[in-house]
Image (cartoon, rainbow, N blue to C red):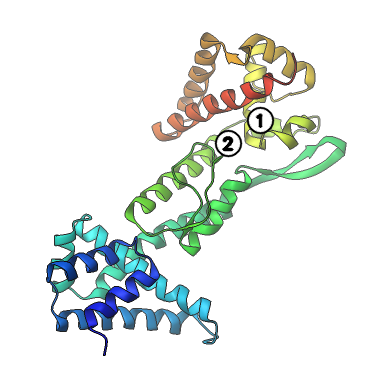
Amino acid sequence: MMNPNNAILLAASSIDSQLFLAQVLAHANEQGKITQQEGEKLYQEITTIAHKLITMKITELSDMSALRLQIQNAFTLTSLGVEYGSQANFDKAIRLLLRNRIVQFFQIGNTLTDKLVARAHKIMAEGGRLSPVVLPGDDTEDFQIYNQAEQDFLKEIPQYRINIHAPQITIRETIPLQKLARLTDVTLVDKQLTYLENRAHYVAVLPIENIFKPNFSFNDTIFNDTMNPVEFVSIGLMANLILHRQLDFKLDDDTLADFTEIVYTDGEISPPIRQRLLDWIAQYLEKSEQSEAVRAYAIAYWDECLTAYAQITKHQFR
């Protein structure tokens, strides 16, 4: 018969050796800090959690991939709870495991991730798009606040998966899907969700009625090939502020060319104009009674839009 300690280690390592719980159990085994009886108790409690998840969420017991996923979730959520409770300290984690029921740590991990999942669902439901806008050729299209990588990020959270390695003002760099397994992942997702929520707050206080007026349309080439809608609208607002000193979003080729000539030199942004624009959006959002966090995000977002558009100036409107 397999030693219960080794049974736990085998189960943990077969799920994910990077889990904090797997590392704690390995450490405890090496240090001889868990007896056979204690190891058996821990193993049985995790097995019970996995069984409950399978009973609740699996209808076809022959689906081995679905069964394995729920076993993974049992370990992952328990591991998050242990890591959270111990502040990622191995020795403290061992003491907590021996003094408390495993299900308590599962509940902590489940609460942590449930909050992320609820926020992701809310963002997708409430902040993903606005009314349709008019595109070239009189077509209409939903005004997407988030780009495809950001939409993919939101869709993966309920599956406890992430596709980024660090929070980004705009998600531009993604990685192959990874399991949301450590507290650092929870922190990463939390910060990225906050960025996306702040994007929605920023867009909501723009004079949206001007974006959707009948004579507004996107520049077809740039919109489709280079910039997402919110970036395009932000650049349009900046261009009209610089060229006409008014809140508008008109962006045709002539407007873009004039804006580019004034703001950029060899693809580099004029520092005084950059600061003027960032000061403007900060003051605008302050008057709109937006939080400091939203203002800080919008400033960073405008700065990023200017930088992204700088790449375009190297190839267009010269």
Query: Would you say residue 127 is visible in this rendering?
Result: no
Q: Is residue 288 left or right of residue 82?
A: right
- Quarter of the N terminus within the rendering: bottom left
In the rendered image, the residue lying farthest to the bottom is 1
Using the image, determine if residue 53 lies above or below residue 279.
Answer: below
Using the image, determine if residue 134 lies above or below residue 33.
Answer: above
Q: Residue at x 63, y 12 (%)?
A: 266
The percent coordinates of residue 235 (x first, y second) are 64, 25
Label pair 1/2, CB-CB below 8 angstroms: yes
Q: Is residue 232 left or right of residue 91?
A: right
Using the image, determine if residue 41 lies above or below residue 121.
Answer: below
Q: Residue at x 39, y 70 (%)?
A: 15
Instruction: Please rate how many residues cluster around mark 1, counting C-alpha atoms within 10 Å: few if below 14, some from 14 to 19, many from 20.
Output: many
- Disc marking residue 203: 2
Q: What kind of element bears circle 1?
A: helix
Q: Whole-Å distance between the Cαs marked 1 and 2? A: 9 Å
